[in-house]
Amino acid sequence: MRDYSITIIENQEKKQKPDPNQLEFGKHFTDHMFIMDYTEGTGWHDPRIVPYQPISLDPAAMIFHYGQTVFEGLKAYKTQDNRVLLFRPEKNMERLNMSNDRLCIPQIEEEFILDCLKQLISMDQDWIPSAEGTSLYIRPFIISTEPYLGVAASKTYRFMIILSPVGSYYKEGIHPVKIFVEREYVRAVAGGTGKAKTAGNYAGSLKAQEVSEKLGYSQVLWLDGIEKKYIEEVGSMNIFFKINGEVVTPALNGSILEGVTRNSVIQLLNHWGVPVTERRISIDEIYESYKKGLVEEIFGTGTAAVISPVGELNWEGEKMVINDGQTGALSKKLYHTITSIQNGNEPDPFEWTVEVKPNC
Amino acid sequence: MRDYSITIIENQEKKQKPDPNQLEFGKHFTDHMFIMDYTEGTGWHDPRIVPYQPISLDPAAMIFHYGQTVFEGLKAYKTQDNRVLLFRPEKNMERLNMSNDRLCIPQIEEEFILDCLKQLISMDQDWIPSAEGTSLYIRPFIISTEPYLGVAASKTYRFMIILSPVGSYYKEGIHPVKIFVEREYVRAVAGGTGKAKTAGNYAGSLKAQEVSEKLGYSQVLWLDGIEKKYIEEVGSMNIFFKINGEVVTPALNGSILEGVTRNSVIQLLNHWGVPVTERRISIDEIYESYKKGLVEEIFGTGTAAVISPVGELNWEGEKMVINDGQTGALSKKLYHTITSIQNGNEPDPFEWTVEVKPNC
Ligand SMILES: Cc1ncc(COP(=O)(O)O)c(C=O)c1O
Ligand SMILES: Cc1ncc(COP(=O)(O)O)c(C=O)c1O
């Protein structure tokens, strides 16, 4: 633990909170934010919680030119007895440092940042909505700030955490989504940045997303960048297939994100005795199984949507309708179990939740 | 042409200019910058030249999270008779719009932006250094500014141009550089963003760059992301090989940047009657030619370095020393010809240069 303490500047004028029934994803932000700066030689310094406000940067700041940046996404939930829970936050801190490593950004002290995060949430806990499906989305991120146009790692960085009360990620709620299997564009390739949670991966995905939305699909399913044959993941979700009683999901191959929800789903399935395998899965295999009537369920997993059943998969014009376009039993059970653990409505056998104590 | 005019707010306090003999690349910026904003529904609006100053953004601005951004790089040169020349700037405007398309950023009006750029340079023309090898580096860039955490194209953008007086890009000047052939990391893959000038491509390259620098190499040579066999380009340069009297360079395959210098070199070689081919080139082919003593020269091409001779290429520990580590005759001739055209010291048979008239 560092010997410095967090400076706190409280917002004197609290903002009006959005209507909890009208919450859109990532549009409203709370009263405070966390900031900490990094300077080569000094390390991370000046951790502080300040009123949510614009930040000022030199136009030559490297983030604007070479995109050296990483982020995380997790949530805080309000329980019925008014406690505040985080879901496996240490996993996000760990992944943040893994992303930092890939992007040549200095490591953060995971425990210290988790403490800062708790303190920030504690200050803004009135912002955590309590209606079903709602939560407080937490966005830690690091940007490179040195004003320099050479292509090199920045010598200064800014770490920030902002908070946003959210409803469901998908406008359709937990209803099944239609997914388009992408053939032209590629998200990531082994040796690239696919494994890291970094801006460029998402920027590159917008074009395919736009094309598929025009065709009536809400997300794309990425295939591997080499053979365009093996299934990788969806826009911001990992993907699972239930085929003939068994569950399969693409193995962590270096180009997909190691989702926290993915890991939790695998643990739950193991716990329930449902066979689950992480391996390479080709889109042809899925199509063949589909033709034989063996594809029982498909679902995406991610912090934003938790479990997102797939009702239709479009592969080169072939529309595979899954489970009659309805949410499957396993998807429902996973969604119910995970959200119930997150909300403190059910026991937490894996000790996944971490409580944020008031005024911690 | 738009019916709006550019607002100009002049800097009252001019900054001190850096020592022209100590110019580093991209560290100093001039007195003014150009800004223009985009809002969905309105289009691009409020073009203005204002004092160079920090910009203020919401911490949720999409640039910080999903990296939707593009940039360009070109230069202005001062001639001996004090005129100011740009080198093929319309190519950069064209490429900017091509990058915009890939990144789902709205198109800019190329001619109008070129006018704005000239006006900005004209205001800050005292900043253009005149010593040999120096110039004014021009960095147009567009960032996504909407404060929203959903993965989608931003509804607002900011276009900016900043200017930086520069010396040589490489500390070694025009001396040959040592290049490391990268095997582990990948820059881009067909279907990805490699063809576009966008931040994520550079963020992803830092790790390989860092590793190769530790081994004593100044840049990496990227191989294709699929077979890791075919030559793509260097960090911020395209690459050419002179083998047994013929020049070859990787074809534009969708994953490398379409360099303006690359295009100019090909035109010059054609003009001189030197055989030049754009095609797929494997690293094995280079190694075999090298063993036979046929690799006469290797050089990189880019706006920053113009022509950068390669003195050594390290491929899996095999050190290929090119032309005894000296600058070859063709590299020298190309460097001399291009810089002389850029500086107005030699005739410009291709009409590549565009003059910036005073107070245009
Ligand atoms: C590309 C990508 N894949 C998968 C996921 C799912 O990861 P997690 O379950 O940790 O939220 C996310 C994001 O949140 C993502 O951005
Ligand atoms: C990746 C990359 N390749 C090649 C080049 C060379 O292009 P140009 O000659 O237009 O400067 C650049 C940059 O400037 C670059 O960033």
Image (cartoon, coloured by chain):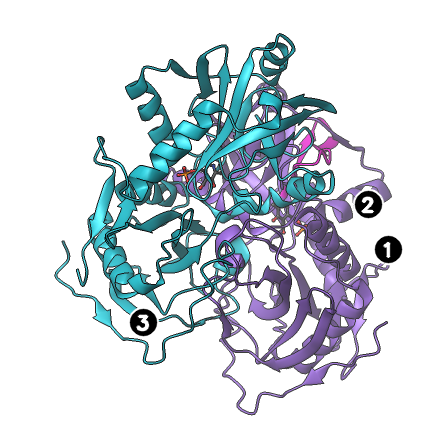
Chain colours: A cyan, B purple
Side (left or right) of A192 relative to B260: left
Indicate the secondary structure of the residue bearing disc 3. strand
Reply above or below: A330 against A15.
above
Reply above or below: A266 against A217.
above
- For disc 2, the neighbor class at 10 Å (few under 14, some 14 to 19, many from 20) is some
Cα–Cα span, label 2 and label 1: 9 Å
Residue A86 percent location from the top left of the image? 28, 47
Q: In front: B268, or B139? A: B139
| Residue at x 84%, y 78% (from the top left corner) | B3
Camera sees residue B79: no
Q: Name the residue tied to disc 3.
A: A50
State yes or no: Cβ of the residue under disc 3 lies below 8 Å from any atom of ligand 1.
no
Residue B60 percent location from the top left of the image? 48, 61
* Number of numbered markers: 3
Cα–Cα span, label 3 and label 1: 57 Å
Indicate the secondary structure of the residue bearing disc 1. loop
Asked if the residue under mark 1 is in contact with the one under mark 2, i.e. CB atoms within 8 Å, the reply is: yes
Nearer mark to the viewer, of 3 and 1: 3
Q: Are marks 2 and 1 on the same chain?
A: yes
Amino acid type indicated by mark 3:
Val
Q: Are marks 3 and 2 on the same chain?
A: no
Reply above or below: A195 against A146.
above
Residue A184 percent location from the top left of the image? 69, 31
Residue A351 magenta: no
Q: Which residues are the magenta region? A: B238-256
Query: The numbered mark 3 sits on a residue in which chain?
Result: A
Residue B249 magenta: yes
